[in-house]
Image (tube, rainbow, N blue to C red):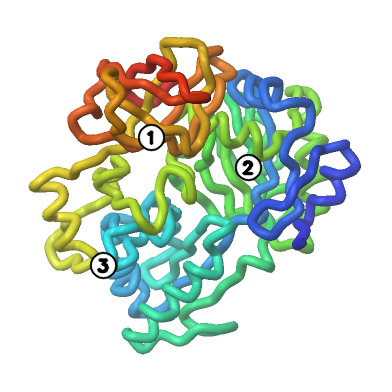
Amino acid sequence: MKTTAFTKYHIAAGARMAEFAGYNMPIEFSGINDEHLTVRQGAGVFDVSHMGEIWVKGPKALDLLQRITSNDVSKLYDGKVQYSCMPNGRGGIVDDILVYRVDAETYLLVVNAANTDKDWQHICAEGAKLGMEAGHGKELYNASDEICQLAVQGPLAMKIVQKMCAEPVEEMEYYTFRKMRVAGCDAILSITGYTGSGGCEIYVANEDGDKLWAALWEAGTEYGLKNIGLGARDTLRLEKGFCLYGNDIDDTTSPIEAGLGWITKFAEGKEFIDRALMEKQKSEGVTRKLVGFKMIDRGIPRHGYALAAPDGTPIGHVTSGTMSPCLKIGFGLGYVAADFAKPGTEIAVIIRDKALKAQVTPLPFV
């Protein structure tokens, strides 16, 4: 298994560790509910160094990104971040990603850990069609093994991070970033995250990981900063209705089905992969949709559980589900037949052969 620049600190803190995307990662420290509420109410730090970072540079950079991503990259300006996805040419999704514009010919793609190799191969294959070369010092470069990343999340997060920065950062806009010094290290400070509770993500070179870690805890002690594992990361994102690749979206789901039409832009001249198919889906509708639901009956939905109509007719399946630490009820996401996708619709979750009542709910849950 791979390790991150911070693995030794997680082990020293007594984290429950497990393999995730080929890395030895912390799943929980003090417990998922405690960590979850810490981020909703205060501040927590996640090691997300397993995420992938791919540079796209040169005069053809925008052309490539307009081809391989669903969102309109031409709308970005220097210092702006965009959520997007990469269609796979078969109506599904290669990955959902973040696109950072450094300047007109320099972009950073942040991709899901488990998909880094797949994404890299896809990007290189499409780049080659435009004459773009891959490798160190080339237009396409996979820097994933050189960069570590911490997500500092929660309503108190930026007060902590401000103590490590010489310039003001607390008022930075959502989905913007700066290349700047953080804790004396060259860094990218990005007002993004996967929790919906505010905060940022900090990217530094692996060799600066120890320095960043020490400074963060020195700054965070007075604000009750806590370590947060991947378990709470999942419950936090689910309460906000954020998709998880491999569960809610994958190579078989289209962004239109997944409710990601807002990142699927049919801009003039943007001939992205699967554009014609997605335009058809948007105009004619889809047969299934990803929805949020809350349990009415007592029960905890889990990935893979069947979803049914009140009369027992199968209508879909759960993609993500658990007990909400904030709402104290079972909740989840799942694909249902389009006729059952309207908020307020009653459905059933099949748990241990019993049909338990649930209701389709608007997102986010909290």
Q: Is residue 327 above or below residue 69?
A: above
Q: In terms of secondary structure, where does tag 3 sit? A: loop
**Residue, x 74% and y 52% (percent of image)?**
184
**x, y percent for residue 237:** 51, 34
From the viewer's perspective, is the residue at label 3 or at label 2 nearer?
3
- Cα distance, mark 1 to mark 3? 26 Å
Q: Residues within 10 Å of mark 3 (few under 14, many from 20)?
A: some
Apparent side of residue 117 relative to residue 313 in the rendered image (left or right)? right
**Residue for badge 2:** 151
**Residue for badge 3:** 273
Q: Residues within 10 Å of mark 2 (few under 14, many from 20)?
A: many
Q: In terms of secondary structure, where does tag 2 sit? A: strand
**Residue for badge 1:** 334
**Residue, x 48% and y 50% (percent of image)?**
246
Apparent side of residue 310 relative to residue 317 in the rendered image (left or right)? left
**x, y percent for residue 75:** 27, 55
- Mark 1: which amino acid? Gly
Q: Quadrant of the image for the C terminus?
A: top left
- Mark 3: which amino acid? Ile
